[in-house]
Amino acid sequence: MENFRNISNQYRRYKAHVSVLGTTQLHLRNPYIIAWWSAAFPGFGHLLLGKYLRGYILFIWEVVVNVQADINVAMVDSFRLESQVVV
């Protein structure tokens, strides 16, 4: 994607991508918003960028890990001020 030939515009983000087939994809996304969604919910940043397969895989993997590790139960117990150590 060599949209910018000028040296001074070398570090700018691309606003659009025009492929050989003529398909144009606009990339009007703030990178801070994408990073926030990725940190808050793994996979959501990829979904916002249009990378659906990787986004869904990360989202499903997060759910599997949370269920297997009982993270949500631990969070509920900590809100209730109950601490049980299961060995």
Image (cartoon, rainbow, N blue to C red):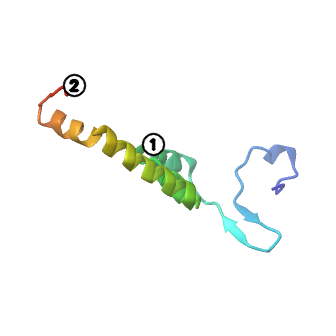
Find residue 8 and report its horizontal and vertical position in percent: 82, 44
- Return the x and y of residue 34 as percentages of the image width and height: 52, 50
Q: What kind of element bears circle 2?
A: loop
Tag 2: amino acid: Val
Quadrant into which the C terminus falls: top left
Comparing labels 2 and 1, the label whose residue is closer to the camera: 2
Considering depth in this image, is 65 or 27 the residue closer to the camera?
Answer: 65
Q: Position of residue 66 (x, y in %)?
A: 34, 43
Q: Secondary structure at mark 1?
A: helix
- x 74%, y 63%: residue: 17
Tell me which residue sits at (69%, 59%) in the image.
Answer: 15
Left or right, 30 with reference to 74:
right
Residue 37, compared with residue 75, is above or below; it is below
Residue 53: image quadrant is bottom right
Q: Residue furthest front?
A: 87
Residue that carries the numbered disc 1 in the rendered image = 39
Mark 2 or mark 1: name the one nearer the start of the chain.
Answer: 1
Dot 1 amino acid type = Ala
Q: Mark 2 = which residue?
A: 87
Is 12 or 71 nearer to us in this picture? 71
Q: How far is mark 2 from mark 1, CA to CA? A: 31 Å
Residue at (15%, 28%) from the top-left corner? 84
Give the side of residue 56 with respect to residue 5, left or right. left
